[in-house]
Amino acid sequence: MKRKGISTIVGMILILAVISTAIVAITTHYLPVLEERLEFKHEKSLIYSFLKLEEIYPGNGTTTLNLGISNVFSPVQTSATVKLWKSGDVTIDVAGRKFDGKLFAIKLYVFNTRIPDESVTFSEGGIKFYQGGKNLTLNPPNIRVYRTNKNVYISVDNLVTKQQEISGNGLAFINIEVLNRIYNFKNVSVTINVNDSIFESYWIYSLKKAGFVLTGNTANLNNVNLTLEIKNYYINLY
């Protein structure tokens, strides 16, 4: 009887040891991998929702973002921040009459617990991706500068609303509304000064292609018919 009792105790100890080893293995190896997968899946879904701005631009629309996730394995929640700010300006002088376009950018910062943080910036229809101190242009901006003989068309974004930011792990919305103003000029001289912190090189290339003479980031063109479109953007984060 005593041997049977001892055998039972030993058996229970062995079972507990196996269970403890399994729990440790799951906690230290399986759960972190599972959490990484969940964060990766959420991050890609979040970025996909953010990239719908490409489909909205240059028109009106709203995209919804699920900023964070939590799971039963970890009390730590992932989170994100969406920021709208003035990224530069394009000043256009048409025969002494000045027009100013305040360029804007919308940036998504994703903060994870298991995988590296990353951010994505949308500006002028283009997308830039940032991670680990490096950046990559995923899609070039939609710089709208065209010329046909003596006729020139220029379209410039202009942010009307204030800079904004929203953070956390709940739902966020980016709402965009646009109001266009179009001006037509005959046989005028045009001077454009560009300060674009994100996509200035694309402006320089487009202006050169349209025949503008450039000195630094200032471009000039004389005796042309100009159609100028100012796109006023009303953007709200909530």
Image (cartoon, rainbow, N blue to C red):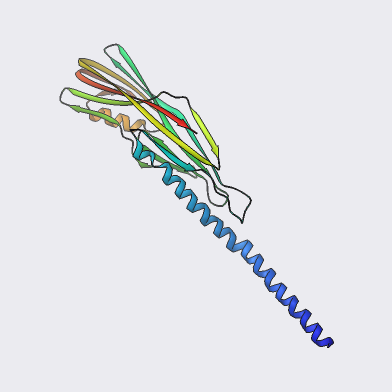
Viewed as shown, does residue 207 lie left or right of 72? Answer: left
Provide residue 234's location: percent of width, then percent of height. Answer: 41, 27
Residue at the farthest left position: 149
Would you say residue 85 is visible in this rendering? yes
Q: Name the residue at 52% across, 35% down.
A: 166
Viewed as shown, does residue 129 lie left or right of 70? Answer: left
Above or below residue 162? Residue 40 is below
Q: Which of the 4 image quarters holds residue 225?
A: top left
Above or below residue 87? Residue 223 is above
Provide residue 126's location: percent of width, then percent of height. Answer: 36, 37
Which of the two residues, 78 or 91, is positioned nearer the viewer here?
A: 78
Q: Name the residue at 71% across, 73% down.
A: 17
Residue at the farthest right position: 2
Would you say residue 119 is visible in this rendering? no
Provide residue 170's location: percent of width, then percent of height. Answer: 54, 42
- Look at the image and tell me in which quarter the N terminus lies: bottom right
Above or below residue 16? Residue 102 is above
Provide residue 45's location: percent of width, then percent of height. Answer: 45, 49
- The mark total stands at 0
Q: Which of the 4 image quarters holds residue 92?
A: top left
Q: Name the residue at 47% across, 42% down.
A: 65
Viewed as shown, does residue 148 lie left or right of 179? Answer: left
Which of the two residues, 189 or 65, is positioned nearer the viewer here?
A: 65
Above or below residue 96? Residue 225 is below
